[in-house]
Image: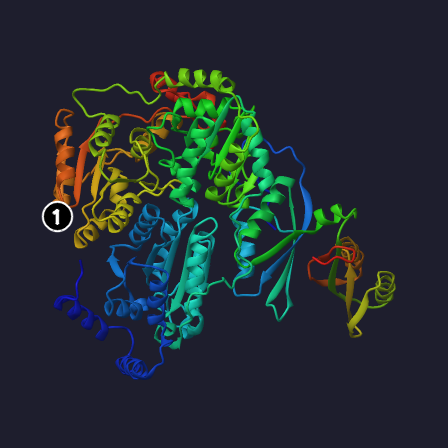
Amino acid sequence: MNAHQQPTGSAYFIAPETAKAESHTLSVLVSNEPGVLARVIGLFSGRGYNIESLTVSETEHEAHLSRITIVTRGTPTVLEQIKAQLERIVPVHRVVDLTVRARDLGQERPIEREVALIKVVGTGDNRAETLRLADAFHAKVVDATIEHFILEITGKSSKIDQFVAVMKPLGLIEVCRTGIAAMNRGAQGM
Amino acid sequence: MRGKTGSSRGLFLCLQSGSEEPPELQQRMDQDMTDTKNQMPDNQMTGAEIVLKALKENGVEHIFGYPGGAVLPIYDEIFQQEEIKHILVRHEQGAGHAAEGYARSTGKVGVMLVTSGPGATNAVTPLQDALMDSVPLVCISGQVPTTLIGSDAFQECDTVGITRPCTKHNWLVKDVNELAATIHEAFRIAQTGRPGPVVVDVPKDIQFATGTYTPKPQVAANVSYQPRVDGDINAIQAAVELMASARKPVLYTGGGVINSGPEASRLLRELVELTNFPITSTLMGLGCYPASGSNWLGMLGMHGSYEANMAMHDCDVMVCIGARFDDRITGRLNAFAPHSRKIHIDIDPSSINKNVHVDIPIIGDVGHVLKDMIRQWRALPTKPAKAQTEEWWSEVARWRARKSFSYKNSTDVIMPQYALERLNALSKGRKTFITTEVGQHQMWAAQFIDFEEPNRWMTSGGLGTMGYGLPAAIGVQVAHPDALVIDVAGDASIQMCIQEMSCAIQHELPVKIFILNNQYMGMVRQWQQLLHGNRLSNSYTEAMPDFVKLAEAYGAVGIYCDDPKELDDKIEQMIAVKKPVIFDCRVANLANCFPMIPSGKAHNEMLLPDEATDEAVATAIDAKGRQLV
């Protein structure tokens, strides 16, 4: 979302950052109270961090807890800093870098899934092709008329990117994506 | 002091009848309040009463504020009690800086009270100032009634939205039953962990509504905010071992030592005594180690001493205690202390590795960590021999001999450095507190005034807020009525919050404003000389007020001095006056503040006063450095 920027902190940081930027998925457990999302997002925009994907929803109603899943990009130092800055926010309970955790557990990546709704409008052969491809991608038809389909697809972001790409020539007119929901593999909880 | 005099009561009544509530509604509210007050159980009261009771329970004795429509119910409660004294400022920015001065000089939480809309937006500058300098501040702001929020009502603004990035935390209270708990939590968050400002926004209908007062909890309810104070014992052990192996050690201390409380300063002095390490401090940490101490190197950083910066550059072990590697300290980062291993003690985990990578981070409160550190140092099986750092100390002696704060004195004009040397000498032996504005005078004050104790020095370090000094001095004087409180000011900065003279007079606070008047925004001009070919764009003040007459207009005492021979007498005269004083000290117009690490340069590339010729100044900063702040 934000343009790539120099690591924040000092104006004296004129030495070019040599470390490579990586994409990491963070899980942030917060109290479900007014303004908490604004605090998290404000931190990212205020300090010039990137947000590539953002998902938020209440996960534990009784405990008033929400879980925010953020995919962000930065050098290892910046990612450490993002985690520390998030932990400084008063209603933030825990921050887990799922990507680092997956590595610690000897796994390549955390499980990451996204849901998308895709509206395709067309007639004739395109409709048959749409359904054939939807089937191949395990997408479900959730609404249809003789002019359109709405397809629901779940999967990794890359799979959805691919599905959107193949649907474009077949009459895709609208896409809605949830952003990434993620957790680590294995029997251990967060 | 404001008493319940006939005139102020009269004014109050007249304000009330002219308030924006329709008269019927106002009457009904008054009626409700009187009715309910008579039959309420002890813990049932109005929101405004809850605010006052919660402040008292949190030990508040003074609040700084300015009334307005949306806080009138709270002001009404203030009127009807004696315990909490309200200091009426002339601008909400003044309230915030006064509360900061109060907090920094006492270690207590500063409290400010402002109205909605412009009251809250005027509070933004001191809130950010307090955030950057880690000052515990509770700001209670009025808000339009909950029913009007979002309707662009008169004097409405999104206070929690505006203050979210400039506070440690903030709340909009929409239920009167949560008001007391929120205020208790506000005080806990403001003063624990890394201290900072918080805002509690209270809509007017919540101030009128009746609810339950909940006393301060013994154990904090909020589980997500539990700062840790004790450092990891293994990290401290590793730090002590590294320190014991050092041949060129330096202690780099900061405001965190002061914030941790007087015990932390005592422990720091003990640690210096034990280790015999040289010690320097940031602007914010001055006073945590006495300037008269034999291990003192002076302040470090952009305008710090040669010995402090050279020791930082050449050290092999750096112990950072409650400081945060700010850009004004480090200079060019890739040339910062290149041969050192670094230990960093900080209560805020986000300060670790933010600007500078450190080898041993210790997260915890300075006081707690120093206690453990001293214990473990004492327990070392073999202490380092004195000879281990002997060579280092002789290097320090060579750097000290450069006398980097030296200047060429004059018998005709007062040199600003001389003025502060005299002020320092003549205010010694008293209970003196110094505040400053921002600019050259601030740096000279840091260089030339000796601080022996913590909490005696109040300055805007992180944000660099011109206008901080006078209201901060007012806050200090409120907390220490018998002390000598001096605001070292510049002629430009002082005009940013000059209206608070009126506050000082009203509350009989004999603050002394010592203006180093060079008719320039000196630091702006110095940078224009360094960076912009000496084109002095808008840094000369053409129309300067007559400060003596200005003082007299407010009912204070004005003193003018432009002769070095008269300076001592006039400073003594200023100190003797039991009223606010504006001292217009005319100093050499074109003096600049040295030594200086030019932007983009390293610690060992300082520009020293005797080398700072016009040409050296004009070429000190290269194209890359020019882009920096």
Q: Which residue is mark 1?
A: B553
> Where is residue B435, by image quadrant?
top left
Q: Is residue B388 visible?
A: yes
Q: Residue at x 79, y 58 (%)?
A: A163
Quarter in which the C terminus of chain B is drawn: top left
| Residue A176 x, y percent position in the rendering | 69, 63
- Image quadrant assignment for residue B540: top left
For label 1, the SS is helix
Above/below status of B575 relative to A67? above
Residue drawn at 34 percent across, 30 percent down: B291
B580 sits to left or right of B290: left
Relative to B430, residue B198 above or below:
below
Residue B489 position within the rendered picture, expressed as x and y whole percent measured from the top left: 26, 38
Where is residue B470? Give x, y as percent. Answer: 26, 45
Q: Position of residue B269 (x, y in %)?
A: 41, 34
Q: Amino acid at mark 1?
A: Ala
What chain letter is assigned to the residue under label 1?
A: B
Residue A37's place in the image compared with A48, above or below, is below
Quarter of the figure that contains the N terminus of chain B: bottom left
